[in-house]
Image (cartoon, coloured by chain):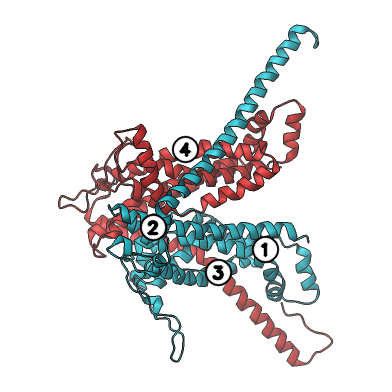
Chain colours: A red, B cyan
């Protein structure tokens, strides 16, 4: 804002303050544009996936896309049913969540309610480091360590399976779930715990009956984040689950997920613009819609169960 | 009703207390066990890579190009590519992310547009990385015609880590007390002068922490780069950014094909020969050590910050 300078009414100083005002506004505009870039990116993603998918849906009806049980766009007898990819995604995510949610929650309860200060100070950064390990490394671990290990217990397990990919994915997601859950639980005010202890509750009772209900919205958000991580995870499944699109409900089989299919096509040499290539945008659109559903669900849960202190 | 100190009643209370104490102990054991399992998994992951990959980690491994012969193959083009791409990513993500964070914390009025931007930043952080790859294919590679180049890959990863940088910037700025800003305003500083001379310098360490975490994430990202269509067999280096003739710097490398560490590793994992998988383990080891060091540095910085700064 230009402030008139009463001591020095010369036009020069006024011009200077006008220049100063202009500079301030230009900087503000630039900063705004940088912030608005995020909106632009979102629209670019949506626009691009839809416009490129339209090329695909000119060849394949939406009905066929949603109901056909075969996904063989790269064969001569091409079928374009997304269901096999969705089933692969669902199974691997389920296996991952069966590991990640209970383990993540237990670790969070321990760190937030039980652990002594020093243990927490060491364990939290350690878990953060685990979360920072590249997914391709977890893929290596799944294929060359976990699968052979599982094969000693389950001799029928093939070299590529949703089970070992899902297990490792679950281990990979534990840090995300546990650190977000723990943050939510730590943000519950101390006096609620003290009230609970005062009437003779144990730490476990306090954690289950007081702290968790009070931080439900944060915990729900952590779970949703875990789910959308699992659904969108690519490299672990691409490496350890094989890439054949099978409509399977058995985690002991190899299968492709939406994400691994995109990887498979990108690794091939299909030309941009061919139906085969455009399928990855339709698959990507499906994936985006799936994660969008989870994000909205998380947003609603957070609103519904938000406790204000 | 029996009095409190009646033996029957006391026994009942004792049983209840013992029961709940058992559960408490059980929960404690479960927590410690779960944490131990996480630690053991990490040891198994690291250990298996050390056993398989350590013998391959020689000087030649860092100075050789990938090769058809596993014992002669190395990661020269991969680590050079990773370094160059990180330069592009940092150059794009840091200014944009910090500017966006400054705007949202210091300038943004409370209105609909601000709210939309904020929701968007949160949502972008939840978009799977492979979707960014698809965006990059459509936008950078084909519509802008940047091709399958270092520039495309760097910009893609920059978009991917933008939310991380924005959130870190906002948190760092938010922790600066209002009194600092009021002091600057009282001396007649404009908003931008306050931000540039006070807010940003004081939050620099916090922002740096976020940037390091973001770059550590970008180093390991594989899926979006595969989607761009990066070649996996690159046995040459991009042209050097520093030239011995005028004008001494060259940006030719921005438009050249590349490979990066995680792609190289993925390529070796998918080969059937065991010798290549040992190469993959060695590359993975380098990758893990790199990300661990970066994340460790970020955690250390944050720890120092929390300890030292008392406003």
**Closer-to-camera residue (B54/B290):** B54
Precedes in sequence: disc 2 or disc 3: 3
Q: Chain of mark 3?
A: B
| Tags 2 and 3 on a common chain | yes
Identify the residue shown where x is 33% and y is 64%.
B73
Mark 3 nearby-residue class (10 Å; few <14, some 14–19, many ≥20): many
Under tag 1, what secondary structure? Answer: helix
Q: Chain of mark 4?
A: A
Q: Chain of mark 2?
A: B
**Residue indicated by mark 2:** B223
Q: Nearer the viewer, mark 3 or mark 1?
A: 3
Mark-to-mark CA distance, 2 and 3: 22 Å
Pinpoint residue A124: horizontal percent, then vertical percent: 61, 47
Under tag 3, what secondary structure? Answer: helix
**Residue indicated by mark 1:** B173
Identify the residue shown where x is 65% and y is 62%.
B206
Precedes in sequence: disc 1 or disc 2: 1
Q: Chain of mark 1?
A: B
Picture layout, residue A60 above or below residue B14: below
């Amino acid at each position: 804002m230009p402030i008139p300078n009463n001591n020095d009414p010369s036009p020069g100083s006024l011009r200077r303050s006008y220049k100063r005002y202009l500079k301030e506004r230009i900087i503000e505009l630039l900063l705004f544009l940088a912030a608005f870039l995020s909106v632009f990116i979102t629209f670019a993603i949506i626009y691009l996936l839809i416009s490129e998918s339209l090329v695909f849906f000119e060849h394949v009806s939406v009905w066929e896309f949603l109901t056909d049980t075969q996904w063989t766009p790269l064969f001569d007898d091409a079928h374009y049913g997304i269901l096999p990819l969705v089933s692969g995604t669902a199974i691997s995510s389920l296996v991952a969540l069966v590991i990640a949610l209970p383990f993540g929650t237990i670790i969070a309860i321990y760190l937030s309610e039980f652990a002594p200060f020093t243990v927490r100070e060491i364990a939290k950064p350690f878990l953060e480091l685990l979360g920072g390990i590249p997914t391709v490394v977890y893929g290596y671990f799944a294929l060359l360590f976990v699968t052979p290990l599982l094969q000693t217990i389950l001799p029928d397990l093939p070299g590529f399976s949703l089970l070992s990919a899902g297990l490792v994915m679950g281990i990979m997601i534990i840090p995300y779930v546990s650190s977000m859950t723990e943050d939510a639980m730590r943000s519950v005010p101390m006096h609620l715990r003290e009230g609970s202890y005062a009437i003779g509750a144990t730490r476990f009772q306090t954690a289950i009956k007081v702290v968790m209900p009070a931080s439900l919205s944060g915990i729900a958000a952590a779970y949703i984040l875990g789910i959308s991580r699992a659904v969108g995870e690519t490299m672990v499944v691409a490496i350890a689950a094989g890439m054949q699109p099978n409509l399977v409900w058995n985690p002991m089989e190899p299968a492709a997920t939406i994400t691994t299919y995109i990887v498979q096509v990108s690794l091939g040499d299909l030309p941009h613009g061919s139906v085969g290539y455009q399928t990855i945008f339709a698959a990507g659109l499906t994936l985006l819609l799936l994660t969008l559903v989870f994000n909205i669900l998380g947003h609603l849960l957070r609103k519904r169960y938000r406790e204000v202190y | 009703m029996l009095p409190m100190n009646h033996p029957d009643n006391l026994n009942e209370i004792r049983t209840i207390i013992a029961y709940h104490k058992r559960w408490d102990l059980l929960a404690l054991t479960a927590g410690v066990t779960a944490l131990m399992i996480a630690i053991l998994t990490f040891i198994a992951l690291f250990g298996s890579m050390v056993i398989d990959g350590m013998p391959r980690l020689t000087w030649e491994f860092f100075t050789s190009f990938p090769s058809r012969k596993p014992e002669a193959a190395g990661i020269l083009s991969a680590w050079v590519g990773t370094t160059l791409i990180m330069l592009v990513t940092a150059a794009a993500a840091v200014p944009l992310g910090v500017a966006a964070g400054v705007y949202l914390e210091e300038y943004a009025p409370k209105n609909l547009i601000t709210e939309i931007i904020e929701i968007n930043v949160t949502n972008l952080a939840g978009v799977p990385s492979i979707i960014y790859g698809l965006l990059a294919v459509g936008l950078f590679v084909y519509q802008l015609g940047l091709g399958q180049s270092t520039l495309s890959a760097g910009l893609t990863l920059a978009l991917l880590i933008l939310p991380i940088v924005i959130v870190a910037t906002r948190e760092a700025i938010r922790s600066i007390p209002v009194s600092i800003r009021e002091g600057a305003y009282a001396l007649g500083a404009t908003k931008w002068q306050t931000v540039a001379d006070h807010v940003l310098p004081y939050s620099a360490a916090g922002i740096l922490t976020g940037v390091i975490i973001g770059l550590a994430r970008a180093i390991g990202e594989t899926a979006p780069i595969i989607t761009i269509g990066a070649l996996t067999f690159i046995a040459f280096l991009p042209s050097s950014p520093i030239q011995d003739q005028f004008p001494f710097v060259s940006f030719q490398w921005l438009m050249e094909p590349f490979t990066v560490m995680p792609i190289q590793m993925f390529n070796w994992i998918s080969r059937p020969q065991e010798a290549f998988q040992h190469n993959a383990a060695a590359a993975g080891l380098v990758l893990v050590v790199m990300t661990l060091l970066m994340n460790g540095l970020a955690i250390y910085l944050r720890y120092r910050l929390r300890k030292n700064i008392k406003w």
